[in-house]
Image: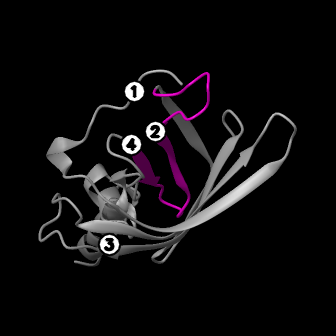
Amino acid sequence: MLGLAALSVSLKLSAQAVQPAPGPATPAQSQNKPGQAYSGMYAFLREGEFVQVTIEDDGRVTGFISRFGEGESDKGTFVDQFFKSGKLDGSKLTFTTEIIRGVAFDFKGTVERGEGKNPGDEAYFVLKGTLSETATDANKKATSRSQEVQLKIFPQDAEPEPPVGK
């Protein structure tokens, strides 16, 4: 009887030893991380322009702004400006773009629930805050202007295709 008890304990220990260790999160688990629901395409300043925001696991924010050029050489063409830095801390969102053709953008604000009723609806989330645009001319003179913005998330089934190239 004592031998049977020892065998039972040995089998239990062996079973525990072969159980798989917790691995990386599955895609379904990753989507439930706080902030990742805010990832998506948001309307930018003019019709046809947008900002793509992607929230990483650690609160780092990546993305880009796709906008119409305003300079002589790029007027009316799409210009993509990738984020140089970005962070989400709770609902506080900040990002800064790379300088492209003398222009950079800086956003400081929050991600809030908008007027959309269901996830996937237009304006379900809204980026509210201050958008600053800094432009540097050929003489290296920088001018900056800021404005309060409310950038609404696009409906999920109607996201525009991002333009190719810069």
The residue beneath circle 2 is: 66
Relative to 1, say whether 155 is above or below. above
Q: Nearer the viewer, mark 1 or mark 4?
A: 4
Q: Nearer the viewer, mark 3 or mark 2?
A: 2
**Distance from Cα at disc 3 to Cα at disc 4:** 66 Å
The residue beneath circle 4 is: 49
In the depicted view, which residue is nearer to us: 21 or 45? 45
Amino acid under label 3?
Answer: Val
The residue beneath circle 1 is: 163
Q: Quadrant of residue 100?
A: top right
**Distance from Cα at disc 3 to Cα at disc 2:** 64 Å
Of the numbered discs 1 and 2, the one sitting upstream in the chain is 2
Contact, mark 2 vs mark 4 (Cβ under 8 Å): yes
Relative to 12, say whether 51 is above or below. above
The residue beneath circle 3 is: 9
Check disc 2 and report its element: helix, strand or loop. strand
Amino acid under label 4?
Answer: Glu
Contact, mark 1 vs mark 2 (Cβ under 8 Å): yes
Looking at the picture, how far across and down is residue 71, in whole percent? Answer: 61, 31
**Distance from Cα at disc 1 to Cα at disc 3:** 64 Å
